[in-house]
Amino acid sequence: MIAASDLNGTLTTGSPILPLATWAGKTDGGVRPKTFKVRLLYSYLWVKLGFVDTHIWADKYLRKGLDLISSPTPERLDQAMAFIVETELWPKRKSEAVNFLKKLHGQGAEIILVSAAFEPAVDHFGKKIAANNVTGMGTPVILQDGKLSLVDKLTIRERKMERLSEKLGSARLDYALGDSIADLPMLESAINPVAVTPDIELRKIALERDWRIIE
């Protein structure tokens, strides 16, 4: 049995970006993390108002956020990603959806988390669900020549399905969890699609097709 799930909006309402600035402020101090927070929150207002595409905004600030990790090493990156999960993503988890995955895992399911968030953070979140048989597929973070960067494409939309398909191979997807219409391809590929606090478009489809809905 295999179950795949989106992360942000589906399993947690937390942000993978904002706590990175908090970590940088606690670790290195200075005004840069504070300035980043102000710009981040101000720019997000434009997203909420519909003037900026969510994925374009996320791409920009996920990349800029990594610049806050000064003198990056694998250890410092791991510390920052663990901080994101411990202080933000896990405390703001959607308990019913997370517990649903835990139940499936207890029944022998392999869990795959597919997200645009930093892959090391997705991995840390996955370990909170179970210590084994959980794979986190976020956007990979690269450390090269003393600088952190993300791969060219975030794990969203078509890329999310590409990576999931590569992971599954010829195996079937038994369950899929998602919260927005952007997750529709993944949900449609599963035998048992589950909509988690779905947006208006996804809710309409879920009701029409009699899919399970977790509020």
Image (cartoon, rainbow, N blue to C red):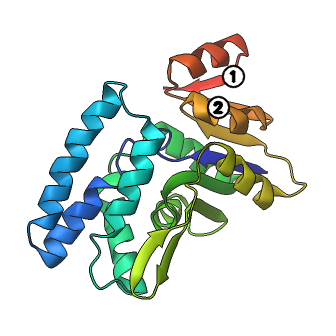
Q: Is residue 173 visible?
A: yes
Q: Residues within 10 Å of mark 1 (few under 14, many from 20)?
A: some
User: Between 176 and 151, which is closer to the camera in this rendering?
Assistant: 151
The numbered disc on residue 211 is 1
**Residue visible at 15% across and 71% down in the picture:** 26
Cα–Cα gap, marks 2 and 1? 6 Å
Q: Give the secondary structure at mark 1.
A: loop
Q: Is residue 210 left or right of residue 196?
A: right
Quick check: marks 2 and 1 in contact, CB under 8 Å?
A: yes
Q: Is residue 108 visible?
A: no
* Badge count: 2
View extreme (right): residue: 170
Q: Amino acid at mark 1?
A: Trp
Q: Amino acid at mark 2?
A: Val
Q: Give the secondary structure at mark 2.
A: strand
Report which residue position mark 2 lands on: 194
